[in-house]
């Protein structure tokens, strides 16, 4: 028994990136990359680049509460920044859920009245042993890849919302 680096693994890193510096996130992704084989996946959530300056009261209250609790939020990234960061470690973004996607594909599809958190995105990144340029080209051709199904679970502000959905995942 124990962790087998040669087997595909799903790393769930939800609710963490907000509180780490960009350098700590980079280092952690590098450590995960060193532990996993090709085909392994990393699921995480991350605020977008506008997170700290948006006017939405719910976002600003969350930022203030985290700071008051001694755990200030430190990082937010654009899609391009994450694509570059992950690419340096052999990962590529395979699925990206924006608040709009989360609202329509998950919350509204089951008739819930919850609201996806503004400016927070969910990502599925897959480890590929390819050069960064090949990763980007492959990402653009992802519709051509063979697909399998992966169920994910998301937690929203007003309680736990467990609803499996399908994400395309490369072999």
Image (tube, helix red, strand yellow):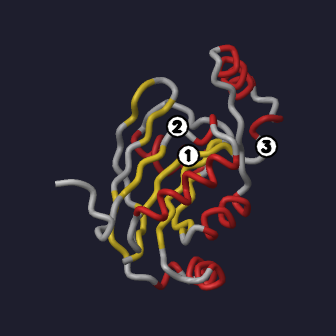
Seen in the image, is 92 located left or right of residue 80? left
Q: Position of residue 87 (x, y in %)?
A: 62, 70
Q: Foreground residue, 73 or 137?
A: 73
Disc with the residue nearer the chain's start (2 vs 3) = 2
Give the residue pinned by disc 3: 50
Residue 137 vertical placement versus 44 (above, below): below
Residue 125 vertical placement versus 11 (above, below): below
Residue occupying the point 49% across, 59% down: 124
Mark linked to residue 20:
none
Crowd tier of the residue under label 3, counting other residues whose Cα lies within 10 Å: few below 14, some 14–19, many 20 or above? few
Disc 1/disc 2 C-alpha distance (Å): 6 Å
Mark linked to residue 45:
1
Q: Are marks 1 and 2 in contact (CB under 8 Å)?
A: yes
Q: Position of residue 48 (x, y in %)?
A: 71, 47
Give the residue pinned by disc 2: 15
Tag 1's secondary structure? strand
Comparing marks 2 and 3, which lies closer to the viewer? 2
Task: Tell which residue pokes out farthest to the top in this image.
Answer: 68
């Amino acid at each position: 028994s124990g962790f087998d680096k040669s087997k595909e693994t799903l790393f769930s890193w939800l609710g963490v990136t907000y509180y780490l510096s960009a350098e700590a996130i980079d280092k952690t992704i590098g450590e995960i990359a060193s532990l996993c084989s090709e085909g392994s996946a990393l699921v995480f959530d991350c605020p977008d680049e506008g997170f700290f300056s948006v006017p939405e009261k719910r976002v600003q209250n969350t930022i203030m509460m985290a700071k008051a609790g001694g755990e200030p939020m430190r990082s937010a990234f654009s899609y391009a920044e994450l694509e570059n960061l992950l690419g340096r470690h052999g990962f590529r973004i395979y699925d990206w859920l924006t608040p709009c996607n989360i609202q329509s594909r998950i919350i509204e599809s089951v008739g819930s009245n919850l609201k996806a958190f503004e400016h927070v995105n969910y990502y599925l990144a897959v480890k590929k042993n390819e050069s960064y340029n090949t990763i980007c080209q492959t990402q653009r051709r992802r519709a051509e890849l063979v697909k399998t199904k992966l169920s994910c679970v998301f937690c929203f502000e007003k309680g736990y919302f467990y609803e499996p959905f399908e994400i395309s995942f490369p072999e």
